[in-house]
Amino acid sequence: QREREAFFVSISGWDMHNEVYNALQYRLGQVNNALKSFVAEMEAQALWNDVVVLSASDFGRTLTSNGRGSDHAWAGNHFIAGGAIKGGQIFGKYPARLAEEGPQILSRGRVIPETSLEAVWSPLALWFGVKRADLNTVLPNRANFLPDGIIEPEQLFKQ
């Protein structure tokens, strides 16, 4: 049995229907500074190898502009970090074509995600101590992505 804790941190201002460039640069700068401080503190306390940081969002953005920004969509980019994480990897595939004729692109530049949330949460659930036999209960849509659509713990974590 593992003892893990979860903390949730939120930063608002990502719903950029207008003026994406400067607003995105500002928000990502805030995230970068916060992560640098957090990692430095966890390393100072010798805890970084026991920490996983995961970004999350309830929506992605369209590829096409609405004039000054972008609108709500499905696919998005996220990161996972931690002392025990195998860094420098990209999971999923970038769409072969970004035009609306592309196989993953719908109208107005809405991208169908290549990698599911279940793919990312499967190894994290195991890290939290969920038994493999219980993964489909904890992640009810997980079975829709088996076997190739799930990230295995050995792909994500250092041994």
Image (spheres, rainbow, N blue to C red):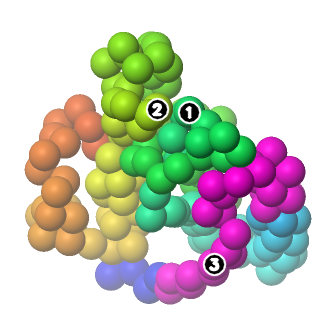
Crowd band around label 2 with a 10 angstrom C-alpha radius: few (<14), some (14–19), many (20+)? many
**Lower sequence index among marks 1 and 3:** 3
In whole angstroms, how far apart are the C-alphas of marks 3 and 2? Answer: 27 Å
Disc ID at residue 1: none
Task: Indicate yes or no whether the magenta region holds residue 7.
Answer: yes
Observer-nearest of 105 and 137? 105
In whole angstroms, how far apart are the C-alphas of marks 2 and 1? Answer: 5 Å
**Lower sequence index among marks 3 and 2:** 3
Observer-nearest of 140 and 86? 140
| Residues drawn in magenta | 5-29
Q: Which residue is mark 3?
A: 10
Residue contact between numbered discs 2 and 1, judged by CB atoms under 8 Å = yes
Q: Which residue is mark 1?
A: 64
Q: Which residue is mark 2?
A: 109
Tell me the amino acid under the disc marked 3.
Answer: Ser
Quarter placement of the N terminus = bottom left
Rendered location of residue 84, percent (x, y): 60, 56
- Is 95 situated left or right of 24 in this image? left
Tell me the amino acid under the disc marked 1.
Answer: Thr
Q: In the figure, residue 132 lies in which quadrant?
A: bottom left
| 132 is higher (above) or lower (below) than 21 | below
| 81 is higher (above) or lower (below) than 131 | above
